[in-house]
């Protein structure tokens, strides 16, 4: 019996939870980077399986781990206990995906909020020692210089990751120094640069003007404070500059949250191949890459059919139309990823036709959606066979039916009621036919066959009129 996508998700989610638990159980301070990676992977797996509640909690764990890495949060016994409790609750959620409790979403939201609450006390103020200030000033000046050099490289090559890695290597030891985060302008600058670099790494984003503006502000602040420290002076209050850096950071992170982009370069490896990527969900149970693709593609087609039915019932369901367009695009991406370019081509064309129909009258979208049934059926038949000739035939038939469903010159559907006579119209038509019959019979050689056909039509119209008025059942 083939396994379902939910069963694969439970297996994979359990693996990620085991890794999170193992990392959390390490002696000393757990590896926040590893926690962040595992939580991010669990969040992606939950989204693919349409488990938004679990994805919400995993995202909160990811955000917490990011703050730990960036120094915005600090390890404590209470925080460790809170994470352990959260992992235990997430296991319960994962194990109940087939029969989720009614309050699952509310429980997930409450858990995510608890994880987002800061628990660590503020760090003590920096040491008031002249030698320490000079040492710290030298380190901050070195970081400011590195940021300046990185700006030049990133302006020429926004996809270059080496300058960002170099900055992280300089920032993390600095943030480990007691009280550095509490220095005006320095703490916000270090935190902002590190968080933004981590977000760039997470989303595989290109360094843009917003990132460069933040790096410039941070560089200026660090350089100014470094000058004061090297002179042996206490740092001046630069609260406004710190707030400006915080604002720039929030703008960048908000924009990144709204546009989670997977860059094409992320799908390829830098090293010379061949490459074999591990995929636990495909390796366990599905039996092969092709079987795993068939499982995922079937899930997409199930979603497509459900949305088609919704639009067929309500032609004004624009949101369903947008989701249907996305479902075809997702099917196309999966097909191309797993080496089924022909099926992906059909899915791409169907999605493009639906996207264009969204800008037209509702009847147009509904007509295409209804007439896509044969196309979807052929895509299913493609997945049900492994024979090359059968798949070629399924794609050909899918394209033919898609052409028929998306003809640009199609007229709106005509209601069947408009094609039938009303009672009065039927009687009037019958009278005109009797006049025509009389004319035929008055000639020297009447066309009896024609008269007979017209008489049958007239009698049929009279019977229709009687039914319309309720006189006859």
Image: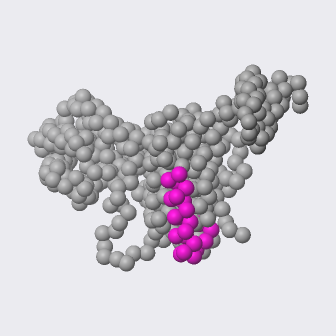
Q: Residue at x 12, y 44 (%)?
A: 230
Percent x, y of residue 411: 53, 38
Percent x, y of residue 5: 62, 60
Q: Residue furthest left?
A: 231
Left or right: residue 203 versus residue 183 is right
Question: How many marks overall?
Answer: 0
Q: Residue at x 59, y 48 (%)?
A: 371
Q: Residue at x 35, y 59 (%)?
A: 264
Q: Which residues are magenta?
A: 383-404
| Closer to the camera in the image, 427 or 435 | 435
| Closer to the camera in the image, 298 or 362 | 362
| Closer to the camera in the image, 309 or 465 | 465
Q: Residue furthest top?
A: 424
Q: Quadrant of the N terminus?
A: bottom right
Percent x, y of residue 202: 38, 53
Assign the magenta stretch its main secondary structure: helix
């Amino acid at each position: 019996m083939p396994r379902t996508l939910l069963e694969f998700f439970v297996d994979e989610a359990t693996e990620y939870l085991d890794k999170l638990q193992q990392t959390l159980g390490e002696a000393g301070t757990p590896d926040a980077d590893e926690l962040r990676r595992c939580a991010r992977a669990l969040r992606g797996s939950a989204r693919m399986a349409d488990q938004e509640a679990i994805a919400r909690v995993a995202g909160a764990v990811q955000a917490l781990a990011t703050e730990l890495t960036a120094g915005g949060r600090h390890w404590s016994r209470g925080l460790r206990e809170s994470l352990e409790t959260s992992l235990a609750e997430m296991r319960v959620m994962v194990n109940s995906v087939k029969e989720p409790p009614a309050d699952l979403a509310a429980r997930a939201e409450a858990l995510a909020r608890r994880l987002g609450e800061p628990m660590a006390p503020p760090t003590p103020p920096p040491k008031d020692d002249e030698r320490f200030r000079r040492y710290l000033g030298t380190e901050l000046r070195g970081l400011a210089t590195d940021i300046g050099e990185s700006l030049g490289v990133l302006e020429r090559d926004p996809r270059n990751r080496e300058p960002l890695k170099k900055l992280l290597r300089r920032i993390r030891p600095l943030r480990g120094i007691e009280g550095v985060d509490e220095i005006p302008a320095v703490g916000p600058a270090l935190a902002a640069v590190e968080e933004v670099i981590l977000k760039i790494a997470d989303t595989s984003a290109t360094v843009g003007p917003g990132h460069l503006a933040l790096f410039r502000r941070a560089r200026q602040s660090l350089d100014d404070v470094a000058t004061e420290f090297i002179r042996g002076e206490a740092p001046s209050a630069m609260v406004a500059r710190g707030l400006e850096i915080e604002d720039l950071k929030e703008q960048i992170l908000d924009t990144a949250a709204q546009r989670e982009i997977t860059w094409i370069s992320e799908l390829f490896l830098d090293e010379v191949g061949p490459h074999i990527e591990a995929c636990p969900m495909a390796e366990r149970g599905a039996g092969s890459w092709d079987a795993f693709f068939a499982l995922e593609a079937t899930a997409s087609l199930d979603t497509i059919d459900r949305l088609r039915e919704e639009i067929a019932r309500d032609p004004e369901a624009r949101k369903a139309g947008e989701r249907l367009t996305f479902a075809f695009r997702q099917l196309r991406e999966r097909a191309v990823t797993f080496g089924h370019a022909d099926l992906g081509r059909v899915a791409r064309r169907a999605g493009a036709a639906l996207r264009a129909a969204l800008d037209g009258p509702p009847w147009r979208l509904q007509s295409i959606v209804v007439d896509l049934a044969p196309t979807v059926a052929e895509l299913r038949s493609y997945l049900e066979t492994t024979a090359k000739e059968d798949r070629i035939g399924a794609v050909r038939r899918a394209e033919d039916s898609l052409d028929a469903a998306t003809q640009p010159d199609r007229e709106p559907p005509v209601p069947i009621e408009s094609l039938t006579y009303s009672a009065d119209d039927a009687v009037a038509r019958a009278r005109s036919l009797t006049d025509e019959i009389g004319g035929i019979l008055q000639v020297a050689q009447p066309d009896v066959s024609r008269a007979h056909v017209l008489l049958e039509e007239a009698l049929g119209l009279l019977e229709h009129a009687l039914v319309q008025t309720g006189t006859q059942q």
